[in-house]
Structure formats: C-alpha cells, structure tokens
Image (tube, rainbow, N blue to C red):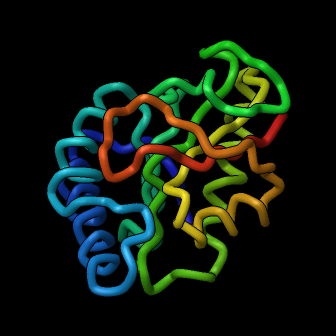
Amino acid sequence: MEIHKCGKKEIASSGAFYDRVVIWLDNHINYPKWIYGVYPSETSVREMTASGSQYICLDDGRIMGAFVLNADPQGNYQNGNWSESLPDGEYMVLHAMAVAPELNGQGLGSEIIRFCAEKAKNEGYKALRADVVPDNYPAKGIFTKNGFTYAGDADLERGLEDIPVFSLFELNL
C-alpha cells in the first residue's frame, strides 16, 4: 500500500472513491453522517488537495483509502477536555478517514493512523487529534485500538444541527 498526497490528476478519482464509500454507508449504517456529493466529495477533495492536506492510499493504482491531515481543527478544539492544553498549530488533526468497504477490518485504518502519527511527530507536532460523530462506534474503536485516548464530547461550534457535539480523541506524541 502506498500513501501519498493527492495530486491534481487524482482529484476526480478521489472524489469518486469518497462517493463510493458514502453510498456504501448509506446502504448500511452511515456512522459518520456523511452526505453524498456534499462531504466528503470531489469539491472537498479539490479544496484539501489545493491546501496540501488530502492524502490517498493506493494499491496497484486503485484508491483504497483517503484522509485529510492538517493542523486545522475545523472548529473550536479549545472546548475539548484534552490531557494537554495545546494551542492550535501544535497538533495535527486527522479528518475524513475512509477505507474501501471491502477492506474494512483488514488493517488499513490502523496503517493510516500510524502514517499520520509518524508524520505529525516528524514535523514537530505534539499530538494527533480527531473528532467523530458520537455514535460512530467503528471510528471510536479504531482510534482507541491505536493508542488514542478519549477527550470527551464537545460542541466544536461548527453549526451542524444534526451533530451538535463530537467525540474527541488524542494521541500525544
């Protein structure tokens, strides 16, 4: 498996990958409450690729995973019950992590998390953080399995009516 930043020529296929995942979620249980064509989508992939924070996981040229890694909490992380009080910019945040449905439970999510933690540490960040919809039990499980600690539920002030609070997780580096 190869993990690298999404390039301009990979935006359409990365957006299509997220669409495929959201369709699968809609036909099963959409734990993250993602919305087809809205988020994550080709539009969000384009924005995150332009900022240098969209990543994809390739296996024999096929996208099998995708995620965003940056220092933008996309909300008020100061509302969290973190073990270490770090100002924005001293931690990285993992967003929109998706794995091809046929690979669920085969370790790609853990591989992505290890990649992100190593990158954050190598770049001098003090922690890797993430937020998930409180009922997203698969995401909570994979973060806990990979050494993250639960930092409470908090309103991140994102203005999402159907997701008033998020469950927060941290991995101090």
Above or below residue 13? Residue 167 is: above
Q: In which image quadrant can residue 129 be found?
A: top right
Q: Position of residue 116 (x, y in %)?
A: 65, 44
Q: Quadrant of the N terminus?
A: bottom right
Q: In which image quadrant can residue 85 be found?
A: top right
Q: Position of residue 13 (x, y in %)?
A: 22, 60
On the question of residue 58 being in view, the answer is no
133 left or right of 144 in image: left
Q: State the residue at coordinates (78%, 25%).
A: 126
Q: State the residue at coordinates (49%, 32%).
A: 156
Which of the two residues, 37 or 109, is positioned nearer the viewer here? 37
46 left or right of 115 in image: left
Above or below residue 26? Residue 65 is: above
Q: State the residue at coordinates (39%, 80%).
A: 29
120 left or right of 50 in image: right
Q: State the residue at coordinates (74%, 18%).
A: 86
Q: In which image quadrant can residue 152 be found?
A: top right
Above or below residue 12? Residue 71 is: above
Q: Quadrant of the C terminus?
A: top right
Above or below residue 3? Residue 164 is: above
Q: Position of residue 101 (x, y in %)?
A: 42, 81
Q: How many marks?
A: 0
Q: Position of residue 88 (x, y in %)?
A: 61, 16
On the question of residue 122 being in view, the answer is yes
Which of the two residues, 158 or 5, is positioned nearer the viewer here? 158
